[in-house]
Amino acid sequence: MKNLSRCIALLLASAAVSAQACNARQPEALPEFFESFINDKDFAVSRTIYPSARVRFQYGMENGRQEIIETRRTASKRDDMKYPALGDYIRTTGIESELQQNSPTSAVARLSRPGMSALVTYHFLLANGCWFLREIQDHAL
């Protein structure tokens, strides 16, 4: 519960900064947000909750039973600025993305490479009419 309260406080602070582009009464459209998020690095950083949660799930078998190892870390804005825009990465690696809105306030983008078992999911949250990245999960299958 403590982490959720911290996340909401950070989200509201971020929303205040990005409020010029958003309206709680008329939330931004998810597809348009995602296009901007993957193609404009500055926009993506402005719409990420920091410190940003990164979770890696490693799946395996141990004594005939499935085993899942979860590793959590955080990334700073400075860490994120080292990498190119997500859209550049998608185009150069042949990764496919699928965007799905799970509820009025949550969405997931699934990134995978055809023929490979790797999957990365980006989890978004809608607050005050703006979409924000709250977590990235790496599913090492």
Image (tube, grey):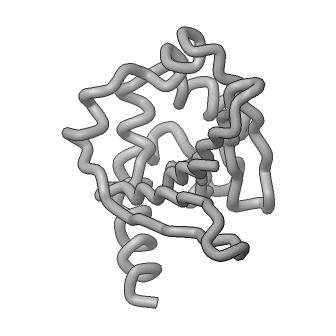
Q: Is residue 70 left or right of residue 115?
A: left
Which of the pair 48/141 is nearer the observer? 141
The x and y percentages for residue 66 are: 69, 71
In the displayed structure, 66 sits above or below 36; it is below
Q: Is residue 59 left or right of residue 80?
A: right
Q: Is residue 120 left or right of residue 117?
A: left
User: Which residue shows up at 69% across the image and 39% down it?
Assistant: 117
The x and y percentages for residue 93 are: 57, 15
In the displayed structure, 37 sits above or below 54; it is above
User: Which residue shows up at 79% across the image and 58% down it?
Assistant: 102
In the displayed structure, 40 sits above or below 6; it is above
User: Which residue shows up at 49% across the image and 25% down it?
Assistant: 86
The x and y percentages for residue 21 are: 51, 37
The x and y percentages for residue 5 are: 42, 82
User: Which residue shows up at 62% across the image and 47% down it?
Assistant: 121
In the displayed structure, 12 sits above or below 22; it is below
